[in-house]
Every structure is written in C-alpha cells, then in structure tokens.
Amino acid sequence: MTPALDQWLSSCARSSGTLGCAMQLPGQAPVIRIFNDRFPPASLAEAMACLAESAQLIYGHGLLPRWFTWHFELGQLRAVLRADGALFLILAQADSTAERTLEVLTQELLDLG
Amino acid sequence: MDDEKYFLEIIRPLFSDWSQNRWQIEVATSPDQALEILKTRPIDLIVVDVNMPVLDGGQFLTLLTRRYPALKKAALTALATEEKRSTCLANGAELFIEKPGTLEGLKSAFAMLDELVSWKTQPGFQGMLRRVGLQDVIQMECLGRNSSILEVNDQTVSGRIYIQDGRLLHAVAGSLTGETAFQKLLSLPSGAFQLQPFAAPPARTLDGPWEFLLLEAARVHDESAPKSPEPALGQESPPENRRAGRLIETLICSGQGSPLYQWQCPDAANRVELLQAISHSARRLGQLLPLGNFNRVEIQCQDSRAVARTAPDRLIFVRVAAENSTPSP
C-alpha cells in the first residue's frame, strides 16, 4: 500500500461518524480499519467480498459504476472502484459528518492516482 | 387599495404613525387609481382589497404580477376563505390577511406588512417561465443539492415542499401532508410557485430518493388521469413528467419481479435480475453489519446515476442522466 493510500485511510477516521473503512488492491489481502466496536473486522472483510461481487454483478448488467452507495436505516456503505481495480469501502453512520463528507473522501481517493 | 374610503382614512394615519413615518402611504379606491399611482412613483408594497366591484382583487393581483413582477403584494379581505386565500396567493400575493376589526388586529396586520416590506430581495433572477412543470423545479433543486421551500398555489390549494441539501423532507398541501400532499401538488395542471429560503419543516414526512418520489407522484397521477386511447402494441407514450428528458429509464416490478410499469427500459428481464441480485446482497450486508433496514442503492456511473430500491412488495429501478452526458443504452 502506498503512503498516499495509507494517509487516505487514516483521513477517513477524521470525520465523526466514520464507523470503518477498508481497501483491497488487486491480488492483495484487504486492509481494514475499524472505528466502532460494533463492526468487527471479520464482518467488514465479508462485506468487502460482498461488495466486490456486487460490483461484478453491476458491470455484468451493463452499468459501469465509479462508486455505489448502499443506504441503510442507520448508515451508508460507500464502495468506490478505481480504474486500477482497487476497491474501497467507507462505512458512515446516518446523519453524521462522515455521511456528509462521503463525496469529498470519494473524490480525494479518485484523485490520488 | 380599498373601495371603502373610510377604512383608508382610518388606517392611513395609524400605519404612518406605527411606522414612525418610515412609510409613505398612498391610497386608492379603485384599480385605475392604483395603477396611476404605480405609474408615477416607485412603490414597494401594495395592499389590495379582495372584494372590489368591476375588477376584483384576485384579478387585479394577476394584472399587477404581470406588469410589476418585483412589486410586493398583500391581499386583504373581510371574508377570508381558503378558496380566496389560494386564489390570491396563486395570483402573486405574498401575504393574505383578514381585514382586522379591532385596533389590536390592525397592529398585527401592520406588523406583518412591515415585515413583508422589509424583506430583502434574494440574489438571483426573477421572472416567468412558461410551461415549466413542478417536476423540473424539484429536479433542479435536488440535482443542485439546494435547500429551499417551494411554495405552490393554484385556485384550489396551496402547499409547500421542503428541500434540504437536495433531499425532499416534507410536503403539505391544504390539510394533507407527506407523500399524499406531494402527489397532490404534483398533479396540479397549472398554478404558481415561489422558491423561498429554507427553514426547518414542522415535521419530516417524506423519505427516500427524490427520483422515486417524483416517479411515484407521476404514476399516481397517470393512474388517476382519464384514460387516453391505448398506444400501438410495443409502443409507450411517455408521460408529461419526462419532458425534461433527464430520466433515462424506469422499471417498477412486484416483489416477485413481474414488471408493473416500465419506460425506455432496454431489457426489463436484465434489470429484474439485477434488482433481485441487489436485494440478495442487501440482505447479506444487513446480516453482516448492524445497520438496520435496507433502503436503496445508488450507483454512480460516468454518464448516469441509477437508483435501485428493493422492498418485499416492490422493486424499483430508475436511471437519470448525469450532467452534460449522453447515456449509453
């Protein structure tokens, strides 16, 4: 993982309401950061796998997502797909600063190069 | 402007006194006198009696709105009814006041008028657009992630739609609230609207993506409208709300995946399969993470944005074009 990506992962924690974040680079194991005990790393790793499958599924149905967001009652899961095949996940609590900064974090990630 | 001269004689010195001479008051007992005054000097606010002979206050307000769009207007009547209120607001009045019968009532009316006259014009353009649907205005506000209150009036009803950061929060239309009120306002064939600065709504009665709420309002409107002749087999006539062209495709299915309504959906079976897979993934994610009930997934593509909502009784897929793009099929 590059220092820039590591810094981005750390920056996710800055906003209050970030419950966790993760990234998976092609051919590597997922890197997971948890900021709330109710979301164990193993669950987030499984969620990453589920999101990777969902991304493939969406591609398979003729849509080319840059990112997609799963809205739940208590939070949002933002999955960002980069052209290099990397998959990122941000888990934000509903009605929190983190939820409101999802667009900024996503753009930062896409601009990282 | 009031045809009851004695009323004008009473309020003129009172209002002048209460405003501590900030107000310069002109009085007119007929619309032609009022128009003459408007021609000769700048006027900030006109207060119009609704019950006037020959040209009633409602019609006069329409004329004023067309001729003097920047002029602030208030309507005054001794017999206030909901119908009169709606008519006056639809015809351009910013305030509708029942004619006070007591000194306290007059003071209260003065305070409201003083507040109205002191409103500063918000930055932006003001004007009239013909053949603009409420859907277009709502789309514009939501796509721009704006916060505002959309005030809507026609001859029969007046209502408000609260929008915050591009999300629809609350709707009220007469005694209705929530989606019913929203659908009622969107079904109006014509009327007037004004965008007001955002203020917190008294309640939150709308939930979910604005695309769905607009779509559902269009569906309810279509279903309640008189049936026109069926289009030829394999063809669908696009409803009025799609005039703006931002919507690319729409599909509504039963919980079991049977298409109930579709529009320009290139491959309904493909979309049903996608919705069912999304539903499956949402269940799995919901089991893994304690996030409560699933609401929707939003998919941001280069050229478009899709929203998929899955509920036990309904699967919905809507895709709208991104700004300045030509969507792929």
Image (cartoon, coloured by chain):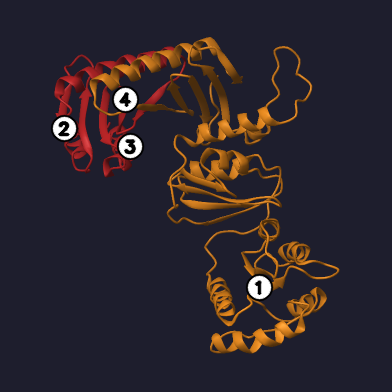
Chain colours: A red, B orange
The three-letter code of the residue at mark 1 reads Lys
Q: Nearer the viewer, mark 3 or mark 1?
A: 1
Could you tell me which quadrant the C terminus of chain B lies in?
Answer: top right
Does B287 appear above or below B26?
A: above
Q: CA distance from mark 4 to mark 3?
A: 11 Å
Tag 1 near tag 2, CB within 8 Å: no
Residue under numbered circle 4: A82
Label 1 chain ID: B
Residue under numbered circle 3: A107
Q: CA distance from mark 3 to mark 1?
A: 57 Å
Q: Secondary structure at mark 3?
A: helix
Mark 2 is surrounded, within 10 Å at the Cα level, by few (under 14), some (14 to 19) or many (20 or more) other residues, namely few
Does B287 appear above or below B190?
A: above
Which residue reaches farthest front? B102
Q: Do callouts 4 and 3 point to residues on the same chain?
A: yes
Could you tell me which quadrant the N terminus of chain B lies in?
Answer: bottom right
Q: CA distance from mark 4 to mark 2?
A: 16 Å
Label 2 chain ID: A
Tag 2 near tag 3, CB within 8 Å: no
